[in-house]
Image (cartoon, rainbow, N blue to C red):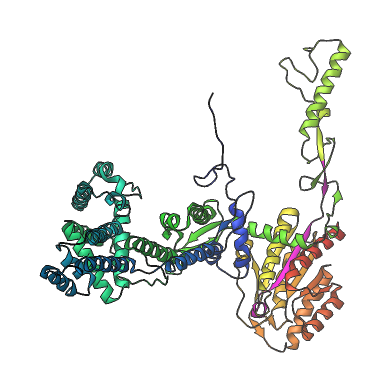
């Protein structure tokens, strides 16, 4: 019997997780867009914040969270230790070997012992030169000879492992064949790089190389490019290690490296390799010093690994900041993210990267002239989101429908049905219609005494159903009275200064969404006004900007609203005005705008004349004040006295609630 073991899936994103709902991303961008941020900038803000959990999908960290993690990792690495650990350890072993040798020579009264002591006294202070001098020294003390061998083994392992991560294990065995294998590997590697430079390299060559020497490369590169990338990053890190030391330390460690490579017969091959790597990856930070502030000394291999990771983190930090010209999410190297932050971070980056593509693919964003723009579909979504926010504030008791019986296809279903009558436009109740035909057929068969295949009934010979006129039923609906809605929105610069501009746009989108979806029999016109007034299309409301001009031309806005109402005389007229200032401009006979502050008497007379026309049309004009201004209050009170409308003074965050509630209240009363 087969046995199975089940556990958490850890090989990447959950393959059974629901797809990311890109509409949630658009909703997250909505507030920024309504405040005047461009869609492209709003998308970048979303990338920085990340994605909140939704529909069972996990939260995705944004670039700011990942940046904080990268910077914390850089601080940890810098605090791991000092870069001169190998040099310090080499000095300690050298001093120990010399001390052991002096201890063996001291009791010997011979001239040979004194000559050896003189030779030890004459050793240079430079560790590399001292090691070079002692490489041919005939040690009298077996302990000193062993310590010096330990020193040379340490240098060979650390220096080669600094270049080839993982080679240290290959050199633990003192067998000369291990070193010969390293020589053969470097020769084969250089030959493969030169062959690639001539355009003759194949993947088969690489696979053959890895079969022979793959144990020396724990990164398990899949091709030559990945191998070169790994080696070049470590070579550049070793170069930065030398650049980070003092000149004296650099000279000593450089000398030790040269001595080890010469003794191992690898100096020429290492030089060839270094030249090839620099040529292939000149973009790496060769020779750039790095500051480490830890107390513990790091071996050369560990220090090189830390510096390579620090360089990766520096590049990753630059990519995650996205603050350079032409920055794109595609600039972020997923492999670098995986090395530095783990698999979860790769999934987070992949989810963020998909957003822009999905917003375009699903028709919410379109790229024109190199910039992202909202589509009508996106504007509708923002309107729906704005409406949801408004209804979240409106008490359920204040919401309701406004119905009138006897409707056509434009009405709402009541759940009941009735017999079809000539001229009915209601939708057919298919289930009840077919049920009536079946029951009628059964009655006919019983009355005639026929079998199940008797003709003339609702059931035919082939099991079908014959429909008759008396079988049809229609779904009952309720007709809604129609309204002509005008929302007049102040576009003046003061709306931005008072922080009410985003609330006004959100309100306009919410009301437009409510009317076009919930009350499609109504007609709505959004009119913006500053020095002039103009109709605002739904597609331009989301990224609509305020007008940095002088003038609040409510006179012109009321003229446009009046023409809209006159086109729909049978509709219930609803006029809503959102403003933070009294009228300061009006339209002249020649079509130009006249601004004056304080308002000229002519401006007030012409504006109030349009208010009186609204009154004669039967339109109630309700004003929503967004400023506590004495002159504005006096004006709107006069409007209310002439028209009978109401005056509201909501805070900006409750403007949408007030406007939508007032529309619903008016519609219920009209119904």
Looking at the image, residue 235 lies above or below residue 410: below
Where is residue 339? Give x, y as percent: 43, 56
Looking at the image, residue 497 lies above or below residue 539: below
For the point 30% across and 71% down, the residue is 243
Q: Tell me if residue 112 can be seen.
A: yes
| Front residue (pair 567, 9) | 9
For the point 55% across and 45% down, the residue is 14
| Front residue (pair 315, 656) | 315
**Residue 492 drawn in magenta:** yes
Where is residue 104? Give x, y as percent: 21, 65
Looking at the image, residue 268 lies above or below residue 285: above
Choose top left, top right, bottom left or bottom right for residue 65.
bottom right
Tell me the magenta residue range: 476-496
Choose top left, top right, bottom left or bottom right for residue 311.
bottom left
Left of 566 or right of it: where is 198? left
- For the N terminus, the quadrant is top right
């Amino acid at each position: 019997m087969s046995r199975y073991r089940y556990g958490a899936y850890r090989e990447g994103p959950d393959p059974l997780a629901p797809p990311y709902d890109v509409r949630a991303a658009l909703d997250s961008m909505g507030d920024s867009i309504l405040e005047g941020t461009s869609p492209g900038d709003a998308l970048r803000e979303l990338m920085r914040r990340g994605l909140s959990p939704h529909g069972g999908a996990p939260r995705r960290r944004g670039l700011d969270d990942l940046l904080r993690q990268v910077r914390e990792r850089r601080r940890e690495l810098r605090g791991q230790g000092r870069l001169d650990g190998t040099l310090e350890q080499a000095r300690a072993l050298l001093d120990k070997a010399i001390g052991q040798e002096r201890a063996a020579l001291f009791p010997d009264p011979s001239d040979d012992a004194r000559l050896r002591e003189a030779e030890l006294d004459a050793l240079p202070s430079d560790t590399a030169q001292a090691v070079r001098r002692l490489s041919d020294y005939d040690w009298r003390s077996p302990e000193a000879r062993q310590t010096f061998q330990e020193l040379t083994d340490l240098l060979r392992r650390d220096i080669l492992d600094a270049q080839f991560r993982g080679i240290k294990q290959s050199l633990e065995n003192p067998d000369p064949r291990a070193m010969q294998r390293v020589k053969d590997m470097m020769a084969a590697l250089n030959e493969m790089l030169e062959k690639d430079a001539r355009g003759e390299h194949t993947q088969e060559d690489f696979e053959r190389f890895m079969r022979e020497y793959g144990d020396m490369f724990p990164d398990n590169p899949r091709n030559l490019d990945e191998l070169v990338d790994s080696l070049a990053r470590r070579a550049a890190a070793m170069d930065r290690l030398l650049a980070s030391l003092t000149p004296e330390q650099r000279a000593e460690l450089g000398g030790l490296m040269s001595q080890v490579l010469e003794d191992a017969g690898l100096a020429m091959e290492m030089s060839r390799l270094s030249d090839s790597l620099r040529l292939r990856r000149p973009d790496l930070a060769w020779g750039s010093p790095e500051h480490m502030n830890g107390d513990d000394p790091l071996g050369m291999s560990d220090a090189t690994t830390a510096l390579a990771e620090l360089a990766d983190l520096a590049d990753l930090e630059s990519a995650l900041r996205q603050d350079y010209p032409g920055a794109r999410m595609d600039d972020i190297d997923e492999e670098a993210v995986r090395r530095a932050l783990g698999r979860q971070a790769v999934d987070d980056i992949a989810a963020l990267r998909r957003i822009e593509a999905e917003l375009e693919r699903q028709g919410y964003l379109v790229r024109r002239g190199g910039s992202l723009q909202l589509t009508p579909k996106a504007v509708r979504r923002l309107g729906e989101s704005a409406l949801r926010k408004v209804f979240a504030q409106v008490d359920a008791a204040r919401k309701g429908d406004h119905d009138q019986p006897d409707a056509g296809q434009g009405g709402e279903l009541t759940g009941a049905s009735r017999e079809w009558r000539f001229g009915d436009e209601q939708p057919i109740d298919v289930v009840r219609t077919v049920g009536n035909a079946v029951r009628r057929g059964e009655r006919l068969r019983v009355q005639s005494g026929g079998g199940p295949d008797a003709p003339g009934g609702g059931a035919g010979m082939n099991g079908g159903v014959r429909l008759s006129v008396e079988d049809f039923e229609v779904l009952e609906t309720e007709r809604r009275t129609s309204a002509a809605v005008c929302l007049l929105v102040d576009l003046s610069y003061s709306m931005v200064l008072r922080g009410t501009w985003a609330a006004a746009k959100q309100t306009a989108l919410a009301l437009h969404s409510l009317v076009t979806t919930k009350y499609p029999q109504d007609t709505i016109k959004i009119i913006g006004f500053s020095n002039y007034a103009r109709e605002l299309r739904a597609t331009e409301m989301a990224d609509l900007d305020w007008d940095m001009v002088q003038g609040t031309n409510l006179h012109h806005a009321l003229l446009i609203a009046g023409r809209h109402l006159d086109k729909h005389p049978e509709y219930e007229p609803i006029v809503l005005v959102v403003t933070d200032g009294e009228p300061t401009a009006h339209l002249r006979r020649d079509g130009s705008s006249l601004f004056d502050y304080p308002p000229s008497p002519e401006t007030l007379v012409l504006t109030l004349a349009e208010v009186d026309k609204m009154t004669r049309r039967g339109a109630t004009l309700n004003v929503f004040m967004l400023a506590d201004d004495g002159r504005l209050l006096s004006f709107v009170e006069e409007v209310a006295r002439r028209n009978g409308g109401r005056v509201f003074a909501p805070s900006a965050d409750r403007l949408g609630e007030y406007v939508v509630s007032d529309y619903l209240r008016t519609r219920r009363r009209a119904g």
